[in-house]
Every structure is written in C-alpha cells, then in structure tokens.
Image (cartoon, rainbow, N blue to C red):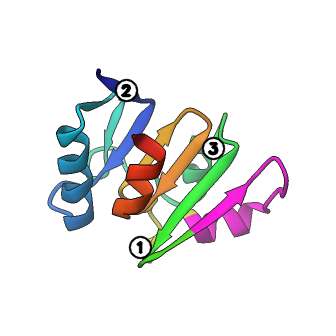
Amino acid sequence: MTRNLDWRYHRPGWKSCKRTQEFLAQYNIQDNVLQITTKDPLIGEAALSILEGVSEIFVAKGKKILHFDLEENALTESELLILLLGRSGNLRAPTIKTGGQLLVGYNQELLETKLL
C-alpha cells in the first residue's frame, strides 16, 4: 500500500535528507508536494506558512524528540521559529507535513512511529 505525505522539504546532498528519502522509498511513501531547499527556500518568518492545519510538531534534536501540541499549548511566533529554523535562518531540512503533524529534522524512530 502506498502512503502519501502532504508535503516534504528536501535539501539535495544533505545526509539527513538522504536518509529520510531512503526510508520513504523503503516503505513506498510518496510526496504529494516536494519542495527543494535550493530552488524554493523557506527563510525566516516565511517558514511559519507551513503550519497551516498543523496541530502537532515533532522536532528531532540529536537523539531527542521534542513534541509540541499546538492545540493544548500555543507557542509564540518566536518560539516556533526557534524550533523550525536552522542556523542559516532557513527552515530545517528535512521537514515533513502529514495530516496535522509536522516532523522537523531526521530521526529514524520518529519516522517509524509517525509514518508507518
């Protein structure tokens, strides 16, 4: 059975994006929309636009996974930007939007629990 993601933000040549892409291929998970960072970057506050329809954010930070339920605890724009943006000021890649969930960064366990 093929499963589709709503949206994925991908940076070619980036190790974590390559691992994410391999995981998706292994489980036959397709992108409805694939946004390439080098062609169409999300910079600064523009990254907030992906939050429409999102009720939960999962952020991979090393081996830790941070979870934020936006319906229970609203975060400020500055708090959201700290979670979403990398050092360059661009949206962190990989980022996946599926259903009401946003997965930021790469973590094998996170992908397995949220996408399978």
Tell me if residue 71 can be seen.
yes
Inspect the image, locate mark 2, and give the three-letter code of the amino acid beneath it: Asn
Q: Quadrant of residue 109?
A: bottom left
What range of the chain is rendered magenta?
Answer: 66-83
- Where's residue 42, x and y in %? 45, 51
Image point 67% across, 34% down: which residue? Answer: 53
10 Å crowding of disc 3: few (<14), some (14-19), many (20+): some
The span from disc 1 to disc 2 (Cα, nearest Å) is 29 Å
Which one is earlier in the sequence, the residue at label 3 or at label 2?
2
10 Å crowding of disc 2: few (<14), some (14-19), many (20+): some
Image point 53% across, 64% down: which residue? Answer: 59
Q: Secondary structure at mark 3?
A: helix
Q: Is residue 86 left or right of residue 18?
A: right
**Residue denoted by label 1:** 88
Which one is earlier in the sequence, the residue at label 1 or at label 2?
2
Instruction: State yes or no: discs 1 and 2 in contact (Cβ < 8 Å).
Output: no
Q: Is residue 24 above or below residue 43?
A: above
Inspect the image, locate mark 1, and give the three-letter code of the amino acid beneath it: Ser
The span from disc 1 to disc 3 (Cα, nearest Å) is 20 Å
Seen from the viewer's position, the closer of residues 83 and 22 is 22
**Residue denoted by label 2:** 4
**Residue denoted by label 3:** 51
Q: Secondary structure at mark 1?
A: loop
Task: Check if residue 79 falls in the magenta segment.
Answer: yes
Which one is earlier in the sequence, the residue at label 1 or at label 3?
3
Image point 17% across, 49% down: which residue? Answer: 22
Q: Secondary structure at mark 2?
A: strand
Seen from the viewer's position, the closer of residues 21 and 85 is 21
